[in-house]
Structures are given as structure tokens and as C-alpha cells.
Amino acid sequence: MSQAVRLISGTERIDREKSALRAELLRRREAAHNARHPAAGAAMSARFLAQFEDTLADKTVAAYWPIKEEIDVRPVLNRLASCSAIAALPVMTGQMQPLSFRLWSPADTLVSAAFGVCEPDPASPEAVPDIVIVPLLGFDDAGNRIGYGGGHYDRTLNSLRRDRDVKAVGVAYDEQECEIIPVGAGDARLDMILTDRRTVLPGENEGTD
């Protein structure tokens, strides 16, 4: 008797490829973090400020509070007020929902949330960002990104971009670059990637120092 063979859909294939890639990228990121934290975060943050500092006045910049071995973006957060910019941090609103954002200042106390994430106090006003600094596990030079697999930033960027021009800036250790990131239908592309060593503009073969 013949055995039925279930065909693997394109979505399933991409999910499997991403799962295998995540394991490798977690190892790469951990090694880079152990070797160069916190200097790498300071270098990446200096690169962000050099790129955007003159245009940040009155802009809302959403970043993140780093967990695990994510590159440290707090030097950017701590400088935004001196650039006349507004800082915000993400808040989870539901498992399959876009993130929302709330205002944050260096004097604010954060609260613990799901997955070990720190969020602004629920009483903090909501914010709509002009720039979103996006954590990631891996990126390629086309601006594709791979995260932890929850899809939160993909849903968030796609939702924000329906109503306004929002710039997505991925930040990472240089070792997190991949030759090609598998891309699914709902994946949101980055406008720029900043590492501790380079600025990567999608479509360019080489990043700038």
C-alpha cells in the first residue's frame, strides 16, 4: 500500500529555513556580544547619531531595551533629548498584534513584561514613531531581517507604513549579516542597518565604514 506524502508549502519551507538559521545566528550574536559588549553598542550608537543627529528635532524615535545579547542601543536613547527628539519604547499589546509605543525618558522606571522585556509604565502616553530602531538576529544587504519568529516587528512596521512614512533602522553586531535571509509574504524590509562597524544601505553591495 502506498504511503501518502504531504507536500511542503512555500511558507513551511521558509519557516524551516529560518528556524535553522536562527540557531546559527544566536551563536554568532552571543560570541560577538561576549567579545565586544559594551563597546560595540557605543560604536553602533555613535553611527546612528552621526547619521541622524541633524534631523532628529521634534522626531519620535522608538528603540528597545536590550535583552539577552542584543546590541545595546541605550546610548542612543540617552542622547535623544539633547537632540530635541522624543524617545519611545515598544509595548506588547497581544500575541498576534502590532506593537504599540509609549514615551520614555531616562528618569522613568520600566516595568517587567513578557519574554523578559522591559516596558514603559502603562500610564506613559502613547507615541507614534518616525524612526523605529529594530533589534534582530540576522540581516542581509537587501534589507531583509530575521527576528525571533514572533512577527511582532513585521506586523508593526507594516501597520505603521500604511499611514505614514516610517524609517526602519536595524541594529546588530557585524557578524549577524547573512548572505540571504529567507523572505515570507508578511516580512517587513529595513531601510538601513547599522552595525558596530558599518552602515548598510539596502541594494548596495558594500557597507560604508
Image (cartoon, rainbow, N blue to C red):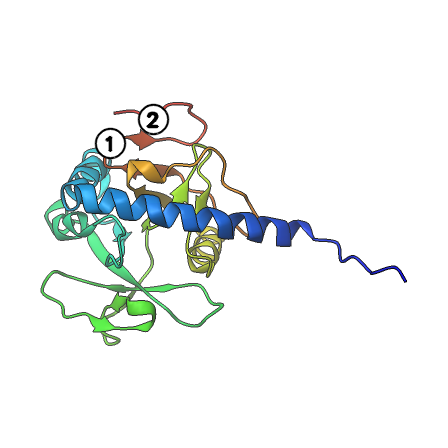
Task: Give coordinates of residue 184: x percent, y percent.
Answer: 57, 48
Q: Which mark is residue 186?
A: none
- 104 sits left or right of 1 in the view: left
Element under disc 2: loop
Q: Residue furthest right?
A: 1
Examine the image and state in which quarter residue 98 appears. bottom left
**For the residues marked 2 and 1, what is the alpha-carbon distance in whole angstroms?**
9 Å
Quadrant occupied by the C terminus: top left
Query: Would you call the spot at circle 1 few (<14 residues within 10 Å), some (14-19), or many (20 or more)?
Result: some
Name the residue rendered at 50%, 49% in the picture: 20
- 37 sits left or right of 68 in the view: left
Classify 132 as above or below 46: below
Q: Residue furthest front?
A: 1
Query: Would you call the spot at circle 2 few (<14 residues within 10 Å), some (14-19), or many (20 or more)?
Result: some
Which residue type does callout 2 highlight? Gly
Examine the image and state in which quarter residue 140 appears. top left
Residue 7 visible in the shown view: yes
Quadrant occupied by the N terminus: bottom right
Element under disc 1: loop
Task: Give coordinates of residue 93: x percent, y percent.
Answer: 40, 71
Task: Give coordinates of residue 8: x percent, y percent.
Answer: 70, 53
Which residue type does callout 1 highlight? Arg
Residue 165 visible in the shown view: no
Q: Earlier in the sequence, mark 2 or mark 1?
A: 1
Name the residue rendered at 46%, 43% in the picture: 189
Front in this rendered view, residue 54 or 106: 106
In the picture of the structure, the residue carrying the numbered disc 2 is 207
In the picture of the structure, the residue carrying the numbered disc 1 is 197
Q: How many marks?
A: 2
Given contact means CB atoms under 8 Å apart, are the residues at marks 2 and 1 in contact?
yes
